Amino acid sequence: MSFSLIDFVANAGYQADLPTNLKKKVKPTNVIALVLMFAIALPFIIISLIYFPELTFIPFSGMLTCIGVITANSFGGIKYSRLFLSILPVTQGALYNAYLSNGAETPIPCIYLIELSFSLVPFVVFDLREKGFLWFTSLYSIALISGFPITKHWLSLETDDTILRDGWLGEVSTMLGVITGLSCMVGLAYLHLQASNESENLLLEAEDKSNTLEKSQLNLQETVKQLEVAQENERKRNWVTEGITKINDIFRTQSNSTEVFDKVIAQLIRYLNANQGGLYVVHGKSEEAVSQKITIQLAACYAYNRKKYLEKSFEVGEGLIGQCYLEEDSIYLTDVPASYVRITSGLGEATPTSLLLMPLKENEVVEGIVEIASFRPLEPHEIEFVSKAGENIASYIQTHRINERTARLLEDTQQQAEEMRAQEEEMRQNMEELAATQEEMHRKEQEYVRQIEELKQMIAPEKGN
């Protein structure tokens, strides 16, 4: 029998859908059946045909049992074929021993050894979890082997068993029994090795899964952190957007610039949960007054939930306000000295923990300064909010300044038009007076001409006389 055929027979009945414990028992069961077939059944068929023809049916039935086990396995009968393989061979061995003992006090040693080897088969083909089958087959084998003093009287065959007890055939049979026992031991060792390999593989797989799980947990934690960061960033963006919307609402609902500045600085302080704030507007930048000195004047101030009425004005480069205008960049201080009132910031008497000065820029032109003082550090997104709000405030200041200039120009134009209309009326009146004067002069001229003509007529007769 070639190796490929043996391997095919050894794996007969192996199916992927079998439970795991039965998958492990298919090959050992088939291998044990092959060992019993070729190491015990076939040799004893030959021995029986030569020396004990009457007992040939026993090893022959053992061969049929082994063939039946492999056939049953190939049809999916692994669960019950193992039971037959555990019971029938030891039964057949006990029968063979009982027939040949002829009522002797002791069993034939080589046959007894073969029976003992058969009793190891259940431990190879059954899993330790199948305790019911193991207990049944083990107790059955023990009962047959230890019950020899009883069963030897049930069966008897008039034949000479000396060749098995003392002859060379006994040594051969003993060797076959040893081979069978060793095969069972090798099977147990194979199963142990298989279990060890599976345990090691399971440990490696568990370790891999643990590493994979750990990596997955790390990835999950990283993902959660990223989501938390994204949610926090989204929350901050929404917070900034909502604050800008509230500032814009003030611009839409208020028309008076003083009220707008008051409400805007109050909204900024409350929304930032800050303590004090001031809004400064740049003056002296109009085109009509290019020679006028630029000043930064306090337009609105808010502190401790109430409006502060202060008058502050800074020149370019003077104090933090003037420096912020000059540099056109924000100034953020977190280490404000205790003598804060000495800092030219115009925010009153309280000493803040943090101080933010933000230029209000529109088209790269500084239109004003916002000053925020707080007893806590401002976060980056809060500073960003002040910066974006500052752009809208600067746009309002610039638009308001343009509107004021436009209104002033319109008023000047209207005044000039009125003056021109008055001048036109005066000129019209002068023209009318001039026309009347000319008419009067023309009338007087005609009167003079008439009088001259009359004089000439009066003079002419006198000359004739």
Image: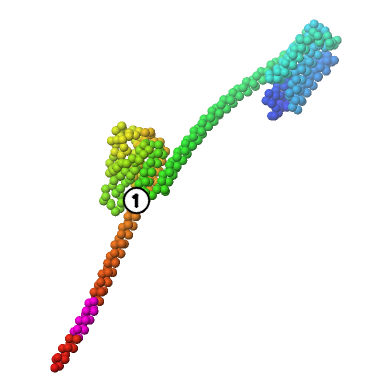
The local secondary structure at tag 1 comes to helix
Q: Residue 434 lies in what quarter of the image?
A: bottom left
Q: In which quadrant of the rendered image does the C terminus lie?
A: bottom left
How packed mark 1 is, by other alpha carbons closer than 10 Å (few <14, some 14-19, many 20 or more), is some
Q: Looking at the picture, which amino acid does disc 1 mark?
A: Arg
Q: Is residue 33 above or below residue 253?
A: above
Q: Which quadrant of the structure image shows residue 275?
A: top left
Residue found 33% across the figure and 44% down from its top: 299
Q: What residue range appears in magenta?
A: 440-453
Across and down, in percent, residue 15 comes to: 70, 28
Residue where numbered disc 1 is placed: 401
Query: Can residue 101 be seen in this snapshot?
Result: no
Vertical placement of residue 297 versus 419, above or below = above
Residue beneath the point at 19% across and 84% down:
452
Measuring 31% from the left and 58% from the top, which residue is drawn there? 412
Report the front residue among 181 and 331. Answer: 331
| Prevailing secondary structure of the magenta residues | helix
Residue 398 in percent (x, y) is at: 36, 49
